[in-house]
Image (tube, helix red, strand yellow):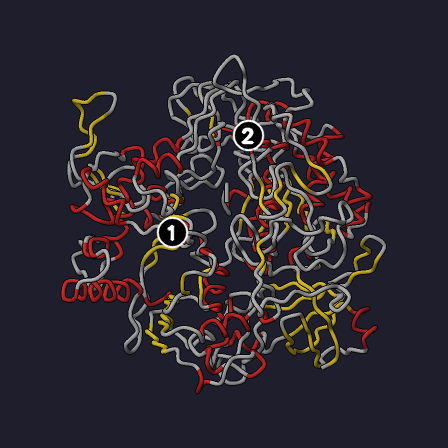
Amino acid sequence: MTNGWVDIKNTDVILAMGGNPAENHPVGFKWFIEAKKTRGAKLVVVDPRFTRTAAVADFYAPLRPGTDIALLLGIIRYALNTGRFHQDYVRIHTNGPFLIKPEFSFTDGLFSGFDPTTKKYTKDSWAYTPDPKSQAYGTDPTMTNPRCVLQLLKQHVDRYTPEMVERICGTPKDKFLKVAEIVTSTGNAQRAGTVTYALGWTQHSTAVQIIHAAAMLQLLLGNVGRAGGGVNAFRGHSNIQGATDTAGNTEILPGYLKTPTGELQTLADYYKAAIPQTLNNQPWASMNYWVNYPKFMVSMLKSVYGNASTKDNDWGYGWLPKIDGNYSWMYIFDDMYRGSSMRVGGKEPGPEGFITFGMNPVGLGPNSKKMIAALSKLKWMVVVENAVTETAGFWDAPKMYGGAPASQIQTEVFMLPAANFAEKDGTFTNSARWLQWKWKALDPPGLAKADQEIVSRILITVQNLYRKEGGVIPEAVLNVSWPYSNPVNPDLGEVLKEMSGKALADVKDPKDPTKVLKTAGQQLDGFGQLQDDGSTLCGNWLHSGVYTEAGNNAQRRSTADPTGLGMFHTWAFSWPANRRIMYNRAGADANGQPWDPTRPSIKWDGTKWVGDVPDMKPDAPPGTYGAFIMLPEGVGRLYAPSLAEGPFPEHYEAVEAPINNPLHPKVTSNPVALTFHSDKDTFGTPDKFPIVCTTYRLTEHFHYWTKHQVAGVLNELQPGFFVEIPEPLAKEKGIANGSKVKVTSARGSIEGTAMVTNRLPAMNVDGKRLWHIGFPIHWGYAAAKGHEGPLANFLTPSAGDPNVWTPEYKAFLVNLEKA
């Protein structure tokens, strides 16, 4: 999320796609209403369903699930062809002027460099054109050269006419043009617009490219870095952002440092692979802030291994676990099910044991039948939870899920009772990147323990076993530092101090070595004080500054707002550096003056940047550095050669495609999409499964948790699983509202109550009438009596995005009939 919840009040236009915030984020949605009330902002909703958000929108347009890219590229084409984009912004803050190699091309659904054998791209032809006169690369400030990014983008999106958008998305031409007109009204200095999204964009086999398309649109309109602008992702849970920041994903370490791979044996090897090469060029240089990677990494290694981490042993880098391939969700369960690792050609055994901590893989993962079968192959499993979930009792799944009889399953299951969120303190990091401290309301019941105590007891026990019995690579286990006052149950304030960072030796001012910024033992002010010589410790560089000598900034609750823009700099702490609007340097022109003086994110006052915490060296005059300080180019990427399936987004159908792609029928779905091919991985075709299905959430239910509350009022508000069906389709199939229906995919069938509505319009797509239905995700077979229901993901496929490996829950094929 580039901006924040409160900042939405500053906008003129909101494009809400890929989410239903009125339903799924009702507290945050008040800022949408505030923008409408105080600024007359226009809310535009594009969604397959007429949602609660659409019900209060100024304009609603339907689209077929999984076709968001086509509509977004259609808006980009409209902006470029009508001139309704912020040309000065594009010239100075994006790679629009950069020249691309002449070898780069796009033909019949494939970019240059595609290998049909490996189904991957070789990206050499996607590179910027080198400048023969220097070590830089070529640009055209006029943006008229046919090989510059802006002109290549114009060429690429030229196929996305209003007629083609209607043909692909089913969105009527007149409605699409109205959406494009409202959204592009912000393509200037006077107005600002925001784009909001959630899991409706992230759960596709083209997820990253959908979000790339939205970012491109906002860069073209000049809406990134501005108050009331940005690309704002709404997290589906109170601390999903915090989990991700602290290495909730397999491919990252805390602070989005890269997880090392096996071939990177030294820190020098790791740095060479991880740190991008700076691409300095006109109109200004790139800070490429990742050149500070060694400061972040060494400080993190010091937090992990403490005094054992020294320069002589590469700061303990050798003890840090390395990966030999992809260990994301679907890969782990594929290995588990097969009993062998496909990363190394099936030559290594799959996992014998599994620890699932505060997660419910059987409910949350795709293709539930495969998940259950995979768990039955384990020798042992540990479940850390506060309720018996489908995962904890997978061996007791109903017969419809295809599991082996319990008597034949050898998996030994241990359940460790854990505290609930109200029974522990710590921080929540919300969608706006705000770290906010919460205080425990009451102690957990019975033997339930807080997360940190469970982790600590496991670590201490394993370390003692190593000391007693020895084991493989003992240094990696025994050198883990655990310096807390109570090592069995660490105080989370102490943990937050460690994450924020402290000086292990005096930290001196680089401009004046005689001046000491921090003495040994003091908390650091922020990541700008981190060192690569072992003199600082920091568990997560992005969170550095949350706990300083002044105290726990996550506990701050001041409502002072000198900017009047809802930044609230003394309310909690926003990473990075307490910044409220990311890329805020782009909110000002080449001279450092705000595009709109009434809504300044930052501005240059002649000696320094003022306003928000600048996303820029605070005293660097305008023209010194590019606004996008983490990118080697220093500018925002309309063209992103780092992505798996192409530097530009392209419309591809879902893995289970209801039609051939109208743009290139021979390349219908994402050519590099993630798919699996065990005997449990079956995929549907439109001849047998002609209806598109999607999943969603409800205000009244909290994920998979509500169903466990025996006396819970929320259960009564949504008492049973239902399938939402458009009225004409229900009539066609003789299905009455409230009757029982069966929904079948290539993976199996579930039953539920028919909820017949007019919220799901028929889509006229490429000359065919396509229907879509949907149902919520919240039920399952492990629930309080009377609140059981089918798992929505019993029907979803093991397929996903090739960049981040998120499963495709939002568009898959089914059939519908009376139960």
Residue appearing at x 58%, y 64% in the figure: 697
- 427 horizontally vs 722: left or right: left
Which amino acid type is marked by label 2? Thr
Q: Is residue 751 visible?
A: yes
Residue 160 versus residue 180: which sits nearer the camera? Answer: 160
The circle on residue 598 is 2
Q: Are marks 2 and 1 in contact (CB under 8 Å)?
A: no
Q: Residue furthest right?
A: 767
Q: Which residue lies furthest to the bottom in this view?
A: 407
Residue 814 position within the rendered picture, expressed as x and y whole percent measured from the top left: 70, 68
Residue appearing at x 68%, y 39% in the figure: 183
Tell me which numbered mark, 2 or 1, is placed earlier along the sequence: 1
The residue wearing badge 1 is 323
Residue 46 position within the rendered picture, expressed as x and y whole percent measured from the top left: 69, 51
Q: Can residue 33 be seen in this view?
A: no
- 387 horizontally vs 654: left or right: left
The circle on residue 591 is none
Residue 799 location, quadrant: bottom right
Against 742, residue 522 (above or below) is above
Label 2 CA crowd tier, 10 Å (few <14, some 14–19, many 20+): few
Residue appearing at x 67%, y 66% in the figure: 774
Against 267, residue 130 (above or below) is above
Residue appearing at x 64%, y 45% in the figure: 15
